[in-house]
Image (cartoon, rainbow, N blue to C red):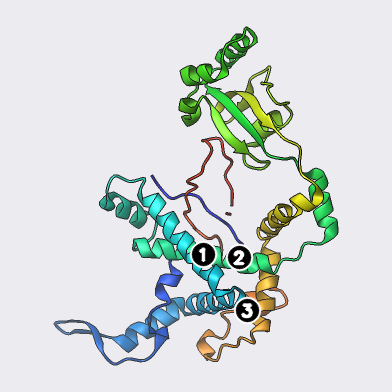
Amino acid sequence: MQFTKKLSLATLSLASIFALAGCDQFKGDSSTIAKGDGIEIKQEDFNAELKDKAGEQVIQQMVLSDIFEKELDGDKIKELKDQATQQTALLKEQYDDDDQFQTVLASSGFSSEKAYEKQLYLYSLMSEAISKNIDINDKELKKAYDDYQAPIEASHILVDDEDKAKDIIKQLDDGADFSKLAKDNSKDTTANNGGSLGEISKGQMVPEFEDAAFKLKEGEYTKEPVKTKYGYHVIKVTKKKDKGSFDDEKGQLKESLQQEKMQDQGTVNKIIKQLIDKYNVKINDDDLKDALNNFISENGSENKGGEINSNQQDNNNKSDENSEQDNN
């Protein structure tokens, strides 16, 4: 299994850079770290080389990490660290032994289990700190509420052949049990559970699946096969509820809107600039003085930091039909 899921939060390349951040912050040191016949590598030479190659990235990440932690209280920071530990443990349980797990970590660019756990924490830290500073107004919330559809509970049967899907629908019309048909015919991992996907929300599934599912009433199934890139689906809605009042729903709607805004690079960079100004951050080292320019310049909306290769695995994945997301 490869860690392939990427969460793009518009700014930081945390994967390997933070691993460098513990390197004595490029202080001079005359000790020898490597030696051979006619060969001697001094700590200060190593630090100078490291500073030249990655100094701006390292100081950028160190400054921003400190800023993000200052934006949150100690209990929240502890919670995020505990979550990262738990997520790493859950992922590790998916492998037969520690050697296999370490091999997968290494192939995904992580030097150790702790490095992976730290990145999970740093991603969550950044997400929490930035979302805290994203304002959502009442007009936005009202529109989100008007567009909102409550989650549904659904099951499906996935097959490769359209004619087979049509035959399954005919069997359902004749009174066959959906759960049994799913167990006998579906190629999806949900077959053992009678095709049950549990609760699904808008935006969680591929569009073709979602469009068909959310049009159904409780107890209804699709009368025609639904084609997606995975094959042909027969979908049944097992439970459908009305959305709550505006006051009931506005909390989770606000969180959802914040998550959407966090995918916009300009928005994220603007917030980071505000936080840099808030804490009066200035870099005194002339060699590293431009490290924060992507955030503090007037034209800094285009950051070249790229994607965060968070490699997070969704242990609550409903099925192979979940759409690819950039959150988490």
Crowd tier of the residue under label 1, counting other residues whose Cα lies within 10 Å: few below 14, some 14–19, many 20 or above? some
Mark 1 or mark 3: name the one nearer the start of the chain: 1
Please state the horizontal and vertical placement of residue 291, each as a whole percent of the image: 56, 80
Q: Between tags 1 and 3, which lies in front? A: 1
Secondary structure under the numbered disc 1 in the rendered image:
helix
Q: CA distance from mark 1 to mark 2?
A: 9 Å
Please state the horizontal and vertical placement of residue 118, each as a whole percent of the image: 44, 66
Q: Name which residue type carries label 3.
A: Asn
Q: Which residue bears the numbered disc 2?
A: 128
Mark 1 or mark 2: name the one nearer the start of the chain: 1
Using the image, tell me which numbered label, if any, was put on residue 177.
none
Q: Are marks 1 and 2 in contact (CB under 8 Å)?
A: yes
Find residue 219 and report its image quarter: top right
Q: CA distance from mark 1 to mark 3?
A: 29 Å
| Relative vertical location of residue 123 with respect to residue 102 in this rendering, above or below | below
The one of 289 and 103 positioned closer to us in this rendering: 103
Q: Which residue bears the numbered disc 1?
A: 80
Crowd tier of the residue under label 2, counting other residues whose Cα lies within 10 Å: few below 14, some 14–19, many 20 or above? some
Q: Name which residue type carries label 2.
A: Glu
Mark 3 or mark 2: name the one nearer the start of the chain: 2
The answer to whether one can see residue 15 in this image is no
Q: Residue placed farthest to the left in the image?
A: 37
Picture residue at 75% right of the left edge, 66% below the top: 135
The answer to whether one can see residue 88 in this image is yes
Q: Which residue bears the numbered disc 3?
A: 293
| Relative vertical location of residue 162 with respect to residue 32 in this rendering, above or below | above
Find residue 321 and report its image quarter: top right
Q: CA distance from mark 3 to mark 2?
A: 23 Å
